[in-house]
């Protein structure tokens, strides 16, 4: 498809991958509907895009709320006439053992990471199929291929997104409507800091992964050359095989690694008084 003058709805657009994807698509002449809770950040991004000659509209919303999702899609239809591209990027993590996770946090994660992906897809997919054109790109994670201790529910939500995306891709084969899933490894965003904060902790360590700009470039590539899934960095495509052959090692040493990480976190918290 020619994407110029089309419309992209991007969730989680206030930072990281969503923000960089919005800027990347806007540079290609795509009108971007920016969705996130932090309205002030969306307004700043919208101004930046408009000053660069692009089109952007802000839709501040909490995607854990079903009616908010409906409001956003109806607002985009009212503003632009419809959705040609849906980027399901919004999501968050939580770091710690599952037994310490509260139900309200778990429920919120399922609503944002899973329910919002399904609901928004169902809201826009029929119109894409009817006009035989459109693309849904879901931001998954390698964590869905190799579940790790300390992020059990997050890994489960991403496994769901990965499986849903591939199945939808196969359902739509032969049409001009596509579904893809992007599976990043560590990305240099505020994800890990937020995940730790969700658990009432301070993030310890640094992230040496790819940048959010790298992921945004991959999204643009998928729009032009659709595939069912894409890993970044590329070497991560071998991860499912590593899980198959080395999963038992993670069974054995994963708990030890998690305990070591948690000791470091608690030591930092004690030292800083947080």
Image: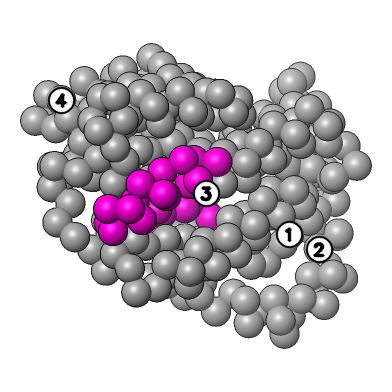
Looking at this view, is 104 or 128 the one in front?
A: 128
Mark 3: few, some, or many residues within 10 Å (few <14, many ≥20)?
some
The boundaries of the magenta stretch are 119-143
State the residue at coordinates (58%, 60%): 164
Tell me the mark number nearer the camera, choosing from 1 and 4.
4
Q: Quadrant of residue 172?
A: bottom left
The spot of residue 201 in percent (x, y) is 73, 30
| Magenta span includes 131 | yes
Tally of numbered tags:
4
Is residue 48 depicted above or below 106 in this figure? above
User: Foreground mark, 1 or 2?
Assistant: 1
Give the residue at the far left of this rendering. Answer: 53
User: Where is mark 2, residue-wise?
Assistant: 254
- The quadrant in which residue 220 appears is bottom left
The numbered mark, 1 or 2, whose residue comes first in the sequence reads: 1
Residue linked to disc 1 = 148
Mark 1 vs 2: CB contact within 8 A: yes
Q: Which residue is mark 3?
A: 207
Q: Does dot 1 land on a helix, a strand or a loop?
A: loop
Q: Is residue 51 left or right of residue 129?
A: left
Residue at numbered disc 4: 50
Mark 1–mark 4 distance (CA, rounded to whole Å): 41 Å
On the question of residue 58 being in view, the answer is: yes
């Amino acid at each position: 498809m020619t994407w110029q003058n089309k419309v992209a709805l991007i969730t989680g657009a206030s930072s990281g991958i969503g923000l960089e994807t919005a800027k990347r698509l806007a540079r290609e002449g795509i009108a971007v509907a920016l969705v996130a809770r932090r309205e002030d950040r969306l307004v700043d991004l919208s101004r930046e895009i408009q000053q660069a000659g692009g089109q952007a509209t802000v839709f501040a919303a909490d995607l854990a709320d079903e009616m908010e999702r409906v409001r956003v899609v109806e607002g985009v239809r009212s503003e632009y006439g419809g959705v040609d591209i849906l980027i399901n990027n919004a999501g968050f993590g939580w770091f710690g053992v599952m037994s310490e996770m509260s139900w309200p946090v778990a429920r919120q994660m399922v609503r944002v990471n899973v329910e919002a992906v399904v609901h928004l897809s169902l809201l826009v997919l029929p119109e894409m199929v009817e006009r035989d054109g459109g693309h849904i790109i879901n931001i998954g994670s390698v964590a869905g291929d190799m579940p790790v201790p300390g992020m059990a529910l997050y890994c489960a939500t991403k496994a769901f997104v990965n499986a849903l995306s591939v199945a939808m891709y196969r359902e739509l084969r032969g049409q001009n409507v596509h579904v893809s899933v992007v599976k990043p490894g560590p990305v240099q965003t505020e994800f890990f800091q937020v995940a730790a904060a969700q658990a009432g902790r301070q993030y310890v360590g640094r992230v040496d992964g790819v940048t959010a700009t790298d992921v945004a470039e991959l999204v643009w590539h998928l729009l032009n050359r659709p595939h069912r899934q894409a890993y970044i960095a590329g070497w991560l495509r071998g991860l499912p095989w590593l899980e198959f052959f080395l999963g038992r090692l993670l069974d054995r040493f994963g708990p030890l690694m998690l305990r070591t990480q948690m000791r470091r976190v608690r030591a930092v918290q004690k030292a800083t008084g947080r």
